Amino acid sequence: MHTLTSTTPFRGAPRRRQWLLGALGGWAGLAWGAPEAAPIPTEPAMVGTSLTVRRVLDANARAVYLDASVQAIVFTADKQASAWVHPVLAEWGAAALVQHRVIALADISAMPALITRMFALPKLRELPFSLGLVQDAAEAADLPRQTGQATLIQLKALEVTDIRFLPDAAALRAALQALP
């Protein structure tokens, strides 16, 4: 039997250290009054409902925030839509996205981790705009989607004011140009 004072390596030590550090971080957050994130609904949002605040990372590990300042989300949930959405957003430009308070999100949760790491992330790092990557399907469960289409969700203080499913690049360009 191994004990913590033994000189024999303890097999569970790294895992227990990770748990301990995570627990300490959680307790520290409670002690300092860190806000607890609201759960994300499991049903797709509709006009009139509100989205919850969340943070996802882009391919360069920079935070992309969905908060009250965001006025629109361009969301893709499959490779087919991403193939034509990313070039349109690159053409529109990062400055225009910021100016119009638009964030781009892509649900990559169905992609195998090895493929994500070896192929997708290196390609996504080259994008000239920040693309929030949803790696856990629960983080985007409330974002409406249709296969092969981009979803444009317009917001006012996190309340959904409009949802459009865009079938192609021309529709996305027109929708972006119409944003306030």
Image (tube, rainbow, N blue to C red):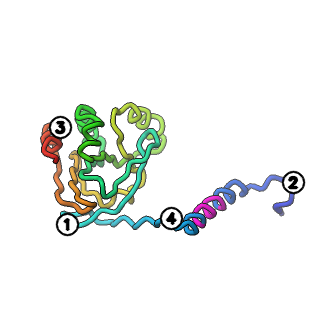
- Judging depth in this view, the residue of 178 and 47 nearest the camera is 178
Q: CA distance from mark 2 to mark 1?
A: 62 Å
Q: Amino acid at mark 1?
A: Gly
For badge 2, the amino acid type reads Thr
Residue at 24% over, 51% down: 72
Residue 148 at x, y percent in the picture? 22, 45
Q: How far apart are the two marked residues, 3 and 1, measured between alpha carbons?
A: 27 Å
Q: From the viewer's perspective, is the residue at label 2 or at label 1 nearer?
A: 1
The residue positioned 21% from the left and 46% from the top of the image is 149
Residue with the mark numbered 1: 48
Disc 4 from disc 2: Cα separation: 39 Å
Which residue is labeled 2 in the image? Answer: 7
If you read the primary sequence from the N terminus, does the residue marked by circle 3 or circle 2 appear first?
A: 2
Residue beneath disc 4: 34
| Residue that carries the numbered disc 3 in the rendered image | 169
Q: Is residue 129 left or right of residue 16?
A: left
Secondary structure of the residue carrying tag 3 is: helix
For the stretch drawn in magenta, the main secondary structure is helix
Query: Separation of disc 4 and disc 1 at Cα?
Result: 28 Å
The stretch in magenta equals 20-27
Which quadrant is home to the N terminus? bottom right
Q: Measure how far apart labels 3 and 2 are at the Cα level.
A: 63 Å
